[in-house]
Amino acid sequence: MLTADEKRLIRLSWNKVQQDFGAEALERMFTVYPQTKTYFPHFDLCPDSKHICCHGMKVVAALGDAVRHIDNISEALSALGNLHAHNLRVDPVNFKLLCHCFQVVLAVHLADEFTPQVHLAYDKFLAAVSAVLAEKYR
């Protein structure tokens, strides 16, 4: 559970998140965890491809919704969880992998602003996002 201070840290730092962070996280995930590519057979998976950029923007938009609804992430991401569980049938482990890669991208771009406190807040927040997306599989 996120504390009030952790929620504040996430909201403050989210203002620095850019649309291309999602594509960068996806590229990192496909490189580090190549098995995740199996869910994107119709994508051009080359760096900076339109497919990756477009899907990366969707990732950032979904995380932005979760930030805006940080007190009710489950409701905010319910439809996305249903889509991934029932239509796309994505292995829920991939949510954790992508969240980890997104956190690395945050650390790279926020640099000194990615303090241990911000790191902990995002770790908890992204774990909550992963859990919400995976709960539709039960």
Image (cartoon, grey):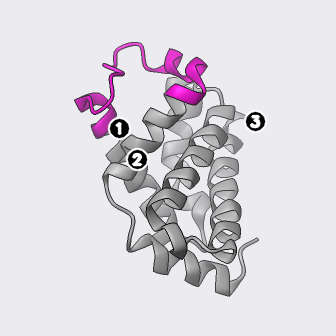
**Residue 49, x across and y down, in percent:** 26, 28
Region of the chain picked out in magenta, as a range: 31-53
Sequence-earlier tag: 2 or 3: 2
Query: Which residue is rendered at x = 35% and y = 37% of the image?
Result: 55
Sequence-earlier tag: 2 or 1: 2
Task: Identify the mark at residue 90; answer none if there is no mark.
Answer: none
Q: Which residue is mark 1?
A: 55
Name which residue type carries label 3.
Arg
In the image, residue 23 above or below residue 126: above
Query: Which residue is rendered at x = 37% and y = 55% of the image?
Result: 61
**Residue 68, x across and y down, in percent:** 46, 72
Q: Quadrant of the N terminus?
A: bottom right
In the image, residue 129 above or below residue 88: below
Query: Which residue is rendered at x = 23% and y = 31% of the image?
Result: 50
**Residue 82, x across and y down, in percent:** 55, 39
Q: Which residue is mark 2?
A: 22
Query: Which residue is rendered at x = 68% and y = 41% of the image?
Result: 134
Q: How many other residues sit within 10 Å of disc 3, few (<14), some (14-19) or many (≥20)?
A: few
Please tell me whether mark 2 or mark 3 is closer to you in this view.
2
Camera-nearest residue between 94 and 82: 94
Inter-mark Cα distance, 2 to 1:
8 Å
Callouts 2 and 1 close, C-beta under 8 Å: yes
Res 15 quadrant in image: bottom left
Name which residue type carries label 1.
His
Inter-mark Cα distance, 2 to 3:
27 Å
Camera-nearest residue between 20 and 41: 20
Q: How many dots with numbers?
A: 3
Name which residue type carries label 2.
Gly
Residue 34 colored magenta? yes
Q: Which residue is mark 3?
A: 138
- Of helix, strand and loop, which one carries label 3? loop
Camera-nearest residue between 91 and 115: 115
